Image: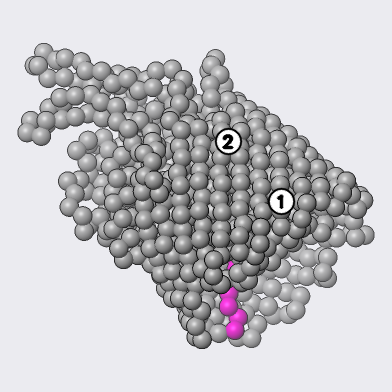
Amino acid sequence: MFTANFRNLISIAFCVAFFGGAHLCPVLADEDAAPIRLEKIVVTPGRFTIYEGTSTRIAISKQEIERFPLVDNDVMRAGHVFPGVVSSDYSARFSVRGGEKGDISVRLDGLELYNPYHLQDFGGAVSLIGLDLVQNTQLLMGGFPAEYGEKMSGVYDITTRTPNTDQLSANFGIDLINATATLEGPLTEKGSWLLSARRGYIDLILALIDLNEDYNPQYADVYGKFTYQPTPADTLTLNGLYGWDKNHQRLDDVDSNLDSLYNNSTVWAKWRHTFDDSYWTDVFIFGGISNQDRTSGKADFDDRNFSFFGTKTELTATLFDKHTVRTGVTWRWLTAQYEYNVQERQAGIDTYKPILADVDDRGGEFNMFLQDEWQLHSKLALNVGGRYVYQQYREEGIQRYEIGPRVALAVKPTNNFILRGAWGIYHQPVSLMGVPVEDGIETVGRAENAVHHVIGAEYTPTDNFFVRVEGYYNTYDNLVGRLREFGRQNQIFEPAQSGDARGLDVFMTHAVSNRLSWTLGYAYGIAEEVAGDETIFRQRDRRHAFAISSSYQFAPTWHLYISWRFHTGEPRTPLIHTEVPQADANILCDRQFGATHSERMPAYHSLDFRMTKRSPYRRWELSWYFQILNLYNQRNLDQYAFSEVRDEETDAIIDCAVDEEPQLPILPTLGVTVRF
């Protein structure tokens, strides 16, 4: 989570970027592509798809996402548009249906990524994957089948596009906070390659601004993809993703000083062998390294070094034209080193609690899945499967494995109406790369788990009108640790042991014509957890959320997009900051917390607008956009935080305050890109 001053700096930087910014957002495929009605019953509920070009699923096209008013055109932020998703202006991370942000599995071309976000010290404001690299994306929010594992709330499954096989092409662009270069082209007659590099330039913008405090956040990433097809039945793909972050900040409050360095790299190779149209295998070999070196306050440090390598094999086969069987096994070896020494400030005057951890461990893990999607009848389909997880490195005396059965059923009584239901047990193992040392835990125990109950209906009266209503009830157990988000609020509470979430999502989209369409989403949800002997609302409890948007193509290459978003406030804990007189006539501030999550933030609402223009020429294409986020400049609040007001001459504390930290103000941006 951003600190208050950093939030203000980001807002200033965005506005500076507005006067000279550009964006890499090429428009691809058919401009008038409309959703297509399902030909085959898809069993999985809670599924939303972003696709490029035409699709066999009812979905939102990538072209539409590229026209959304989004900060940085981030592929992770694209998922924020769906009902049931809980997010904020400042972070690309999100949660679904009452879960936590760490409960989402992010997969890229079949491999789950570790922490794929930049600006880690500020909540993960930017993802490592640019939207221009994406072919399609699926968000699964509940009841997903056994092939998806490791996380217990949702899956964000991203597939990158195939590089250009015809000729060498290039894209160069600058957006709000990034500069990007992408090159791609053929690799002999049987292959192709793509290389994309991006560098954030927030630090360069801040250097132009006269500030009393020192901030220097930097980040960069590189993505490469090579494909080669030696035979018509074999395809080899090599992917590599590297992210780098560095931050330095010096503030008046010494406890907020920070120096950090993050490196995150993953490489994986995939071999697909196709026996025929209904039978193929995928074999992966993968490895990666992640390092974190973080020093904060006066002498606190949090250093983490991870490495991993492994392999996985998956088989897909269609049997007797009725069964689509998928099975797979994964083995991974991990090493992890933690050196953690942090003095966490507690309620009260200068009261600190030391948390120490020194972990050096390694071990293997193994998991496998088996599922069968069975088209029982033209109007009835069943998906049944299970997942097995084993971790060698768990604490002695703890069961080292879990088994999670899953089942889903779809009934299609008419051609335009489908009923779906799902139940499953979802385990989220505590990996060696995710030991919650912040809570004084140094060993790995049993996996966190959730049980999903989902029921819903889809109605498609015409090919261009779609309605989905879905209800859910999820229970969570054996919860471990907390996802830390840095900021001046600094609330430290007892971690939850269990919880539940229940609610209803409504999604509706209508393509009125080839030029005009609208989308409406509504989510109602209640999320609670048990911490100690107390039942409280979970941090992501958002009772009501509503969004409506409309896209209008008023000329062949001109698009107008308008959206309005509203949600009720999330739970918050009251902050009490009182003055304590001292004998020398000075004062100290006593920080206290009220009842946990006993109050709520004010409601959030924002009107956003975007205009896009695409101009194709003979050898190149020019695209530009103009957008305004928070058009009527609503002052939405992100959090409340403790603040000490000091005398400029003596540096003595003269007041103890609780500040309101806002989200984004009105934000106009202009972007241009040239594609060769």
Mark 1: secondary structure: strand
Locate residue 599: give its quadrant: top left
Q: What is the x, y in percent for residue 621?
A: 48, 78
**Location of residue 206 (image quadrant):** bottom left
**Position of residue 237 in the picture relative to residue 43 (left or right):** left
Main secondary structure of the magenta stretch:
loop
Few, some or many C-alpha atoms within 10 Å of disc 1 (few <14, some 14-19, many ≥20)? many
The disc at residue 466 is 1
Q: Do the residues labelled 1 and 2 touch (CB within 8 Å)?
A: no
Res 486 quadrant in image: top left
Q: Give the residue drawn at x 78%, y 65%.
A: 280
State whether residue 458 is above or below residue 32. above
Amino acid carrying mark 1 in the image? Phe
Residue depicted at x 17% and y 46%: 212
**Residue 655, position as x, y percentages in the image:** 19, 24
Q: Which of marks 1 and 2 is in front?
A: 1
Q: What stretch is highlighted in magenta?
A: 159-166
Q: Which mark is residue 424?
A: none
Image location (x, y in percent) of residue 248: 27, 49
Q: Which residue is drawn at 36% across and 44% down?
A: 633
Q: Is residue 13 above or below residue 430?
A: below
In the rendered view, would you say 551 is above or below 600? below
For marks 1 and 2, give the CA distance. 27 Å
- What residue did someone put label 2 on? 99
Q: What element carries label 2?
A: loop
Asked if residue 312 can be seen in this view, the reply is no
Comparing 552 with 90, the one in front is: 552
Along the horizontal axis of the image, is 652 left or right of 184? left
First along the sequence among labels 1 and 2: 2
Amino acid type, label 2: Gly
